[in-house]
Amino acid sequence: MSNENPNLKLLSISVIYILSTVFMWMLSKNNESTSLGYLFILVIIWAILTIVVGFIIWKDRIKIKKWNILILIFCTPIPFLCFLSATSKEQVRGTWEYNKNNHRIKEISYENRKEYSSSVDETTEEYPIPANEKYHLDSIVYYGKNSKIIETKHFK
């Protein structure tokens, strides 16, 4: 056998990295209210595994060549962050909700546009929150470089 084979310890750590990252990411997507907690746990896992990888490299005197470089990259959050940046949607800059004309209005701001949706159910002063979370898109306002309105699309 060639001496260019990947180190199995590094390979197993990279598999643990990938599996734990995917698992925590899936958990955070399922329950967004606890996503910050999962992110905190994920950073702790990354830190522990980075220390373990450093210790394994130091203890076993692993030569960092060809396969081991690729595996070492997968022992870091770099592939996950590249995946997220390649697959993520446009980031939401802010969301606001307020009552207007007996409906709950949801305003979602992106970099170059704002989306306005209104609740299907009516609201009153006594019940300011609609009975269900169903909204329909009312309009989208597109902005230019100087924050000037370029176009407004209305929906019914």
Image (spheres, rainbow, N blue to C red):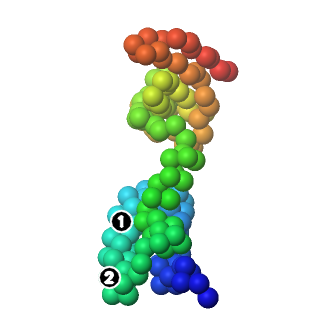
Identify the disc placed on residue 80: none
Q: Disc 2, disc 1: CB below 8 Å? A: no
Upstream in sequence: badge 2 or badge 1: 1
Distance (Cα) linking label 2 and label 1: 22 Å
- Asked if residue 42 lies left or right of residue 89, the reply is left
Residue 45's place in the image compared with 25, above or below, is below
Residue placed under numbered mark 1 in the picture:
43
In the image shown, does 5 or 22 lie closer to the viewer? 5
Residue placed under numbered mark 2 in the picture:
58
Q: Quadrant of the N terminus?
A: bottom right
Q: Secondary structure at mark 2?
A: helix
Residue type indicated by callout 1: Val
In the image shown, does 45 or 124 lie closer to the viewer? 45
Q: Quadrant of the C terminus?
A: top right
Q: In the orientation shown, which residue stands out farthest toward the front?
A: 2
- Asked if residue 107 lies left or right of residue 50, the reply is right
Q: Residue at x 56, y 12 (%)?
A: 151
x and y, in percent, of residue 141 in the image = 52, 19
Q: Secondary structure at mark 1?
A: helix
In the image shown, does 125 or 81 lie closer to the viewer? 81
x and y, in percent, of residue 31 in the image = 50, 59
Q: Residue at x 33, y 77 (%)?
A: 54
For discs 2 and 1, the disc positioned in front in the rendered view: 2
- Asked if residue 112 lies left or right of residue 1, the reply is left
Residue 155's place in the image compared with 75, above or below, is above
- Asked if residue 32 lies left or right of residue 48, the reply is right
Q: Residue at x 54, y 84 (%)?
A: 3
Residue type indicated by callout 2: Trp
Q: In the orientation shown, which residue stands out farthest toward the right?
A: 156
